[in-house]
Image (cartoon, rainbow, N blue to C red):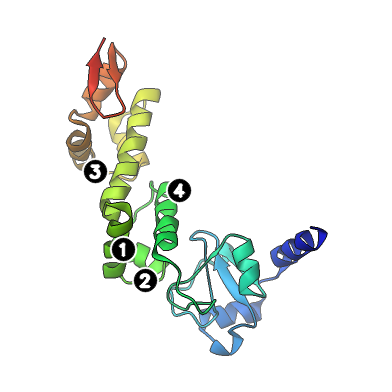
Amino acid sequence: MGEGVTNMNTAKEEALTEEKWEAIVGNDASYDFVFFYAVKSTGIFCRPSCKSKVPNRANVRIFRTAEEAIREEFRPCKRCKPTGERLPDREWVDAIARYMERHYDCAMTLNMLAEMFHGSPYHLHRTFKKIMNATPVAYLQGIRLDKARELLAQTNISIAEIGSRVGLPNPSYFISLFKRKFGITPYEYRKRIMGTGIWTQGGAFDEK
């Protein structure tokens, strides 16, 4: 047990030197298996030679081995395969879904997600839909609308501001999506939730 703690602490202390950063930026294959780098925002780790978009330096962690990165709960990149194996589709999609859940308020496109998670837009869309039974866009919209519903019920923030806070800054589009999912407008939802209506889990009102 003591040895495991020591290894974990050593992994955390591995420094991102200028030499290693330049290897990452330059996709320098000569550093492959000398070290691995992980990106905290995506939960994925890569070889230095990975051709993915250069990450934000502040989000990078360095590991000496792939095993250390895995112990810290990072997953291998589907593009550069740092462990020599392909990341299972379920784990890849789960990582993407978690990213959406944490960053639903940010601008996000299919192309951005594909670049961030090291796959093609087509493969991401097809695989995500197969695993989650929803397209990436539909899944993200669901998260945003559920968050909007919480804010409508729990705050007095304006409807336009709520839309902006959940990543839907166009009020007309936000209202249209909300009504399509819940059957009423945000204004109607707030009015009834503050009155005698009880919102059921299925998405309809029961009058009490």
Query: Which of the marked residues, 3 or 1, is nearer the chain's N terminus?
Result: 1
Q: CA distance from mark 2 to mark 1?
A: 10 Å
Q: Residue at x 29, y 31 (%)?
A: 159
Are there few (<14), some (14-19), or many (20+) residues within 10 Å of tag 3? few
Are there few (<14), some (14-19), or many (20+) residues within 10 Å of tag 4? few
Are there few (<14), some (14-19), or many (20+) residues within 10 Å of tag 2? some
Q: Which residue is mark 4?
A: 102
Tell me: 150 left or right of 189.
right
Q: CA distance from mark 4 to mark 2?
A: 20 Å
Query: Which of the marked residues, 4 or 2, is nearer the chain's N terminus?
Result: 4
Query: Which of the marked residues, 3 or 2, is nearer the chain's N terminus?
Result: 2
Q: CA distance from mark 3 to mark 1?
A: 29 Å
- What type is the residue that disc 1 sits on? Thr
Q: Residue at x 24, y 17 (%)?
A: 206
Choose mark 4 or mark 3, whichever is in front.
Answer: 4
Vertical order, 203 against 198 (above or below): below
Residue 205 at x, y = what percent? 23, 20
- What type is the residue that disc 4 sits on? Arg
Q: Which quarter of the figure has residue 163?
A: top left
Q: Which residue is mark 1?
A: 127
Please identify the quadrant where the C terminus is shown.
top left
- What type is the residue that disc 2 sits on? Gly
Q: CA distance from mark 3 to mark 2?
A: 29 Å
* Residue 155 in sight from this viewpoint: no
Query: Which of the marked residues, 4 or 3, is nearer the chain's N terminus?
Result: 4
Residue 41 at x, y = what percent? 50, 59
Q: Which residue is mark 3?
A: 170
Vertical order, 28 against 131 (above or below): below
